[in-house]
Image (spheres, grey):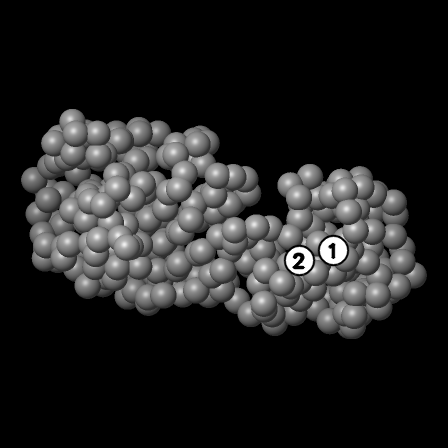
Amino acid sequence: MLDRPARVSRLDPLEVRRTLKREGLRASHARSQNFLADPDVLQGILDLAEAGAGTRVLEIGPGLGILTGGLLEGGADVTAVELDRSLVAYLHERFETPIAEGRLRLIEGDALDQQLPDLVPPPYRVVANLPYHITSPILHRLLERPPRPERLVLMVQAEVAERLAAAPGRMSYLSVFVQYHAAVRVALPVPPEAFEPAPKVSSAVIVLEPHPTLALPPAAEPWLWGLAQSGFRERRKMLRNVLARQLHAGEDGATGPPVGQAGVDAALERAGIAGDRRPQTLSVDDWLRLMAALGRGVAAGGGSGGTAAGSAAARTAG
């Protein structure tokens, strides 16, 4: 069993402001820099991460190192990616000893330019207060190919957290993508005053537990994403009409034969999906059944679409 992370030192917005002033630093609005300043939220993140002695952790956007320090105190080995050169210099000075001991590795650069799954040997976890404007592309980079993290504990905008964990009826393309790859739960609401400076929006901590196996082989996944993207181009329209307009050869993410209205209606019937449903009402398993019924991805996957859909149902159990 992992060692429980140590209790973190007290901090507050005033202390964060003092640190910024003392070090000649400032929060960048363009980079979505809002520094965590609530000890209870910090402890909640550390408890959810369960990153004890020897746990390998990837942190994106460490900022002032508040979360970094808590992870190191709990015994984790941390690789942190920071874009801001001034913050990197501050972190090198603050964490001189853990860096020298090899327990902290700092990478200066844009996380979007990194091959994130290759930065830390598996198994590893991701624990981060993400810059909100890069949440979606970071999730794609972390989940779209192995080695995937065994757990992600992320601070994101509350609206995004709700979208990621949405049930059918409120789904989006991002919901489908993330829930195909991982179980998602909103673990902790976080008010604006937990940060310095306080953002204009509320936040939340989400926990993602990637599925050990996926429904489709990698070569077949583009068919699923192309199909879902086609549906969500007109998310408020009936699915039978949307797909008849959107599913053309080469326009649904992978080259396939034109479908037409009759083909769409027949596929929806085979998949057990009413044609008057809207795209946001479909679950991940619904999209997989529809993909199979359309005959998409069969050659790429080397098996029947029905098998893929069935394995998804067994994997997610809802």
Asked if residue 131 lies left or right of residue 227, the reply is left
Q: Nearer the viewer, residue 108 or 124?
A: 124
Relative to 231, does residue 90 appear above or below in the rendering? above
Q: Residue at x 52, y 51 (%)?
A: 212
Q: Quadrant of the N terminus?
A: bottom left
Q: Residue at x 27, y 39 (%)?
A: 78
Secondary structure found at label 1: helix
The percent position of residue 225, horizontal first and vertical second, equals: 66, 49
Q: Quadrant of the C terminus?
A: bottom right
Q: In the drawing, what numbered circle is on residue 307?
A: 1
Asked if residue 98 lies left or right of residue 165, the reply is left
Circles 2 and 1: CB distance less than 8 Å? yes
Q: Residue at x 87, y 64 (%)?
A: 265
Asked if residue 284 lies left or right of residue 59, the reply is right
The percent position of residue 289, horizontal first and vertical second, equals: 74, 60
Relative to 271, does residue 224 appear above or below in the rendering? above
Q: Which residue is mark 2?
A: 311
